[in-house]
Image (spheres, rainbow, N blue to C red):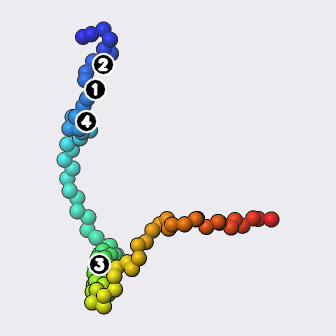
């Protein structure tokens, strides 16, 4: 080993080798807990709420698509003029409110 080298092993480590140091193969038995009537009812309500939310999103997407189809049939362009965050010309002077 050269005199100027202070490292005993290479500095480059692969992702795989660093992950293998952290992984522990521990087999734990699966324990299934029986839900009571409150747990069952709450799971049913959560499932219904998720279903209603997804149905609402689907309905809103269909309404949006129908609206844009109507605009296309009427002939309305998407942007009648070019939008810009920084319009040409001098910027406006801001009126600062002084607290007196």
Answer whether labels 2 and 1 touch (C-beta < 8 Å): yes
Answer whether labels 1 and 3 touch (C-beta < 8 Å): no
Secondary structure found at label 3: helix
Disc 1/disc 3 C-alpha distance (Å): 50 Å
- Residue at horizontal 43%, vertical 72%? 83
Quarter of the figure with the N terminus: top left
| Dot placed on the residue nearer the N-terminal end, 3 or 2 | 2
- Residue at horizontal 34%, vertical 86%? 76
Secondary structure found at label 2: loop
Disc 2/disc 4 C-alpha distance (Å): 18 Å
Quarter of the figure with the C terminus: bottom right
**Label 2 packing within 10 angstroms: few (<14), some (14-19), many (20+):** few
* Residue 49: image location, x then y, percent: 33, 79
Answer whether labels 4 and 3 touch (C-beta < 8 Å): no
Answer whether labels 3 and 2 touch (C-beta < 8 Å): no
- Which residue is nearer to you in this view: 62 or 67? 67
For residue 55, say whether it is visible: no
Residue named by callout 3: 54
- Which of the two discs, 1 and 4, sits closer to the camera? 1
Residue named by callout 2: 7
| Quadrant of residue 24 within the rendered picture | top left
Q: For residue 90, which numbered disc appears in the image?
A: none
Disc 1/disc 4 C-alpha distance (Å): 12 Å
Answer whether labels 2 and 4 touch (C-beta < 8 Å): no
- Which of the two discs, 1 and 3, sits closer to the camera? 1
Residue that lies at the very extreme toward the right in this rendered image = 100
Residue that lies at the very extreme toward the front in this rendered image = 89
Residue named by callout 4: 18
Residue named by callout 1: 11
């Amino acid at each position: 080993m050269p005199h100027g080298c202070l490292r005993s092993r290479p500095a480059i480590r692969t992702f795989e080798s660093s992950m293998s140091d952290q992984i522990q193969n521990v087999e734990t038995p699966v324990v299934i807990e029986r839900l009571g009537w409150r747990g069952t009812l709450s799971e049913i309500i959560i499932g219904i709420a998720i279903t209603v939310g997804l149905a609402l999103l689907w309905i809103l997407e269909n309404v949006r698509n129908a609206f844009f189809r109507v605009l296309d049939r009427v002939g309305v362009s998407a942007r009648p003029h070019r939008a810009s965050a920084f319009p040409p010309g001098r910027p406006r002077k801001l009126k600062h409110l002084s607290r007196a």
